[in-house]
Amino acid sequence: DDAGVLDGGKGTKAIDFSGIWLRDRKNSDSLAGVCKLANVNRFLAKAICLVRGSELVQTEEGLSIRVFSEIPWFSLRERYTFSGNALNKRRDFRRGEMDCTMERTSTGLKFLMKWPEPWGGTEETYYVLVGDHTLHVKTTNTITQSDGVPKSISYTTIYHRRH
């Protein structure tokens, strides 16, 4: 069955992550820790913690992501390409952009992001499909604090595909 599978360009079958994915808040790690590490204001932190899910559209060229929250004004749109770097707005809504790469792995996708000061940092995220309808997003953020010392946090967010 080849339904929902794109050719990875390497002669291998690639996983297609397209769909609406709803966050399983009960079984996911809290996002409050990364908000604190990134020193975002309490309104943005609340919107991030109330993220409901993501809409993913995958093509042979790359992936577009739209994140939506229970807070109506909060929405993120990002684009990634399989063939190099992409620039996306910073997720903390500070000025500047994130330099982003994405590649296929044997179990899904790997993202690397880097952004400048203030509160500069990096993110390494893995998308792993568990069965057909559960997505585990495993993330490690390293963010330089106001004292110049980088601190890291790792967390897992679980999503279920909406039918």
Image: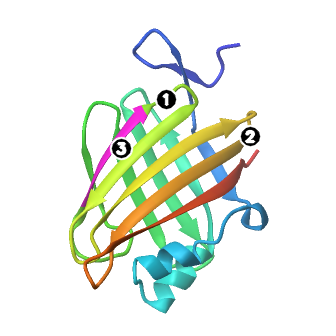
Residue 77 placement: quadrant: bottom left
Q: Is residue 160 above or below residue 98?
A: above
**Does 159 sit left or right of 62 as displayed?**
right
- The disc labelled 3 sits on which kind of residue? Tyr
**From the image, which quarter does the N terminus lie in?**
top right
Q: Is residue 136 above or below residue 32?
A: above
User: From the viewer's perspective, is the residue at label 1 or at label 2 nearer?
Assistant: 1
Q: Earlier in the sequence, mark 1 or mark 3?
A: 3
Q: Is residue 23 above or below residue 108?
A: below
Residue 76 placement: quadrant: bottom left
Going 33% across and 53% down the picture, which residue do you hit?
113
How far, Cα to Cα, is label 1 from label 3? 15 Å
How far, Cα to Cα, is label 2 from label 3? 22 Å
**Does 152 sit left or right of 85 as displayed?**
right
Coloration of the structure image: rainbow
Position in image of residue 87 (x %, y %): 25, 53
Circles 1, 2 touching at the beta carbon (< 8 Å): no
Residue span colored magenta:
98-103
Q: Name the magenta segment's main secondary structure.
A: strand
Residue under label 3: 80
Circles 1, 3 touching at the beta carbon (< 8 Å): no
Q: Secondary structure at mark 3?
A: strand
User: From the viewer's perspective, is the residue at label 1 or at label 3 nearer?
Assistant: 1
Q: Earlier in the sequence, mark 2 or mark 3?
A: 3
Front-most of 93 and 127?
Answer: 127
How many other residues sit within 10 Å of disc 1, few (<14), some (14-19) or many (≥20)?
A: few
Going 47% across and 69% down the picture, which residue do you hit?
75
Residue 10 placement: quadrant: top left
Q: Is residue 136 above or below residue 98?
A: above
Position in image of residue 19 (x %, y %): 61, 43
Q: Which mark is residue 105?
A: 1
Residue under label 2: 133
